[in-house]
Amino acid sequence: MIETAMVLAAGLGKRMLPLTKSIPKPMVKVDGATLIDRVLDRLTHAGAKRAVVNVHYCGGVLIEHLKDRKTPKIEISDERDALLDTGGGIVRALPKLGTRPFFLVNSDSIWIEGAAPNLSRLAAAYDEAHMDAILLLAPVAGAVGYSGTGDFTMNSEGALQKRNEREVAPFVYAGAAILHPRLFENAPPGAFSLLRSFEQAEANGRLFGLRLDGTWMHVGTPEAISEAEDAIRRSSE
C-alpha cells in the first residue's frame, strides 16, 4: 500500500489565462469540481493517507481551499520564494515525503476510469526491487485534448524508452506515477525538470510504465475544459 502522495500544484498556469488571473490552475473547475479536489479524491480512494501539495502562484488561495480537508491529510510544501520546476519541487518536499515510495500526481491530471481505478492498478504493478519509477501512460490515440507526438515507447515487460526528437511515440505521460525517493539521490540543487530523473531511471533500466485503463484528458487551456466536460458527460450516459 502506498500511503503518501505528492501533488504538483506550483505551476504558473499561464496557458489557462484568463481563468487563472486570480486563482492557481488547480482551483479551475471541470464539470463542477476543482482539479485539485479531483486528484485528492482519487488518491484517497487509492489508499493515500497523506498528501504533500506544493504551492507557488496564488499559493495562499490554494492553502485556504485545502485547510479543512481531512482525507488525505494535507501538508503544504511552500515554494512561494522560488520557482523550482517539477524535480526541484519534489526535492524540497522529500523531508515531508519520507523514505518510502510515494504517489506523484500532477494537480491537473484528469481521466475517466476504466474497469479498475488506475492509481490502485499502479500501486499493484509497482515493484520496489526493480523500479525507481512507474508512470501511468495514456495511449496517444483516443486522448482528449492532446495533439502532441507522445513521450515514450514501452516494451512487453513495461520498460520505457523516451521518444527520440524526430519520432512519434504511442504513449504520453498521464501525470501520475509512483516514485522511490532514491531517484533523487544525485539531484542537482535548485530548479530542474522531473524529466531529468526519468532519464536517469531509464539509463539504469529502472523506468517502467503502466497503460491507463480509460480515457485521459489533457486540460491545458480554457478551450480544453469543454472537451473534457463533454467526454465526462458522454461516459455517464
Image (tube, helix red, strand yellow):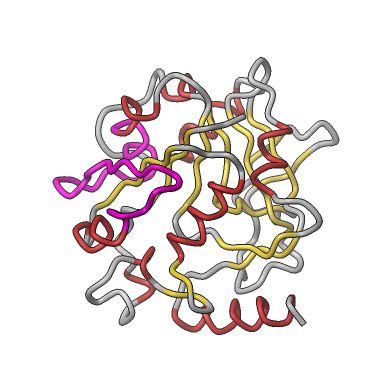
As drawn, is 37 to the left or to the right of 201?
left
In the image, residue 42 lies in the stretch drawn in magenta: no
Where is 26 relative to 83, above or below?
below
Q: Quadrant of the C terminus?
A: bottom right
Q: Position of residue 177 (x, y in %)?
A: 57, 41
Q: Position of residue 5 (x, y in %)?
A: 47, 38
Which residue is at a point 24% across and 77% down the rendered structure image? 21
In the image, residue 74 lies in the stretch drawn in magenta: yes
Q: Quadrant of the N terminus?
A: top right
Where is 200 relative to 218, above or below?
above
As drawn, is 117 to the left or to the right of 223?
right
- Residue at the extreme right of the image, as rendered: 156
- Seen from the viewer's position, the closer of residues 6 and 72 is 72
Where is 222 relative to 152, above or below?
below
Report the magenta residues as a range: 66-92
Where is 142 relative to 59, above or below?
below
**Quarter of the rendering containing residue 215:** bottom right
Which residue is at a point 47% across and 70% down the rendered structure image? 220
**Quarter of the rendering containing residue 236:** bottom right
- Residue at the extreme top of the image, as rendered: 129
Q: Position of residue 46 (x, y in %)?
A: 61, 43
Tally the marks: 0
